[in-house]
Amino acid sequence: MYSPAPSRYAGKNFYRRCGRSGLKLPLISLGLWHNFGAPDSFETARAMCRRAFDLGVTHFDLANNYGPPAGAAEETFGKILRVDFQPFRDELIISTKAGYDMWPGPYGEWGSRKYLLASLDQSLKRLELEYVDIFYSHRFDPETPLEETLGALAHAVRSGKALYAGISNYPPAETARAAKVLREFGTPCLIHQARYSMLDRWVEPQLLAMLQQEGIGCIVFSPLAKGLLTDRYFKGIPADSRAGHDPRFLRPADVTDAALAQPRALNELAQSRGQTLAQMALAWVLRQPAVTSALIGASKVEQVENCVNAVRNLNFTAAELDRIESILAG
Ligand SMILES: NC(=O)c1ccc[n+]([C@@H]2O[C@H](COP(=O)([O-])OP(=O)(O)OC[C@H]3O[C@@H](n4cnc5c(N)ncnc54)[C@H](OP(=O)(O)O)[C@@H]3O)[C@@H](O)[C@H]2O)c1
């Protein structure tokens, strides 16, 4: 029987308040987008989750469509809950989302009340849970009234099927509107899940500033640029890497010498800080006070360990930040 490390909360400043809510999230959270599908090893998936929790990672992020096939990652995590985590449910923050293509027909994607609430029920079944901690609208739907989409989130919270409402990938103007609408519904927006890394800075300066002002937390996804901001590809494309075996969102053609030039230069700086490139990339997104948590993916237990150890050095000198800017500008 799994018994988590008694040291998991010991002596670390590892949790940050999510906006102006009562909820704290770990600086590093684990996402199950890749490597938790049906073709992937259940024992590796399980080992990554257990090790993460042993290291204080309390937050696991899912979506209805994570797999493959869509839904499989929720089933995998449901099984991990059943065999390992069930006694620790109150120590966990489990999120899921709906917004992307999930089932055929007009009610299987985007932001209608019909889709969101049906999808949440399906997610709860796959996860074998009565509630998730955070339910997200996965993307802004330009054709559905925002009040309808967010009304579905508010309903999910009021019905007890979710504890908090979140939004993901919403542009700044729609985020501001969403904050207002959810506040009026009495179910404030807890968090915005947005893509952010040294290679993709669209959230600067507008969105992050607005989230801070609104008291909304921010969890940033793909902080390692899907593996490009790590040493994974410095010696070619390994067969077991994302680009090597699952090129749905990172193709071998994306991993060129040109694409690796900045990561290689950044890697030298990371080494001079006594960090891996992955660790420096995580410290860099966490330097923003508006960022509550860096949401990583992983394919191996060692990657989870390496990423969590990023928190040993989150400080940058002005010279280091300047060097990063000059590498990114080059
Ligand atoms: N809301 C949204 O629309 C949205 C979109 C995308 C993702 N997300 C969420 O964000 C999570 C993370 O996304 P992501 O997987 O793209 O994030 P990422 O952290 O940028 O990339 C993860 C990949 O980097 C490599 N890696 C991780 N740690 C490493 C280390 N220490 N050393 C070397 N390589 C390392 C692994 O690649 P290999 O697999 O090749 O080993 C891993 O799969 C997802 O699981 C999901 O929960 C949300």
Image (cartoon, rainbow, N blue to C red):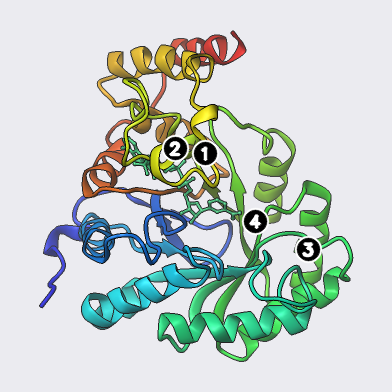
Near-viewer residue (74 or 250): 250
Q: Position of residue 172 (x, y in %)?
A: 78, 47
Q: Nearer the viewer, residue 114 or 68?
A: 68
Would you name the residue on which mark 3 appears?
Answer: 178
- Residue placed at 84% from the left, 69% from the top? 146
Q: Quadrant of residue 302 in the image?
A: top left
**Residue 320 at x, y percent in the picture:** 44, 14
Q: Quadrant of residue 265?
A: top left
Amino acid type indicated by mark 4: Gly
Which quadrant of the view contains residue 88?
Answer: bottom left
**Mark 2–mark 1 CB contact (< 8 Å):** yes
- Asked if disc 2 is less than 8 Å from ligand 1, the answer is yes
Q: Position of residue 49 (x, y in %)?
A: 28, 61
Whether 67 is drawn above or below 161: the answer is above
- Tell us which disc is closer to us: 4 or 2: 2
Q: Residues within 10 Å of mark 2 (few under 14, many from 20)?
A: many
Please tell me which residue is depicted at 74% across the width and 38% down the height of the picture.
206
**Mark 1 residue crowding within 10 angstroms, few (<14) / some (14–19) / many (20+):** some
Badge 2 element: helix
Give the residue pinned by disc 1: 250
Q: Is residue 196 above or below residue 172?
A: above
Query: Which residue is at 21% across, 64% downward?
Result: 43
| Residue named by callout 4 | 215
Residue at the spot of label 2? 243
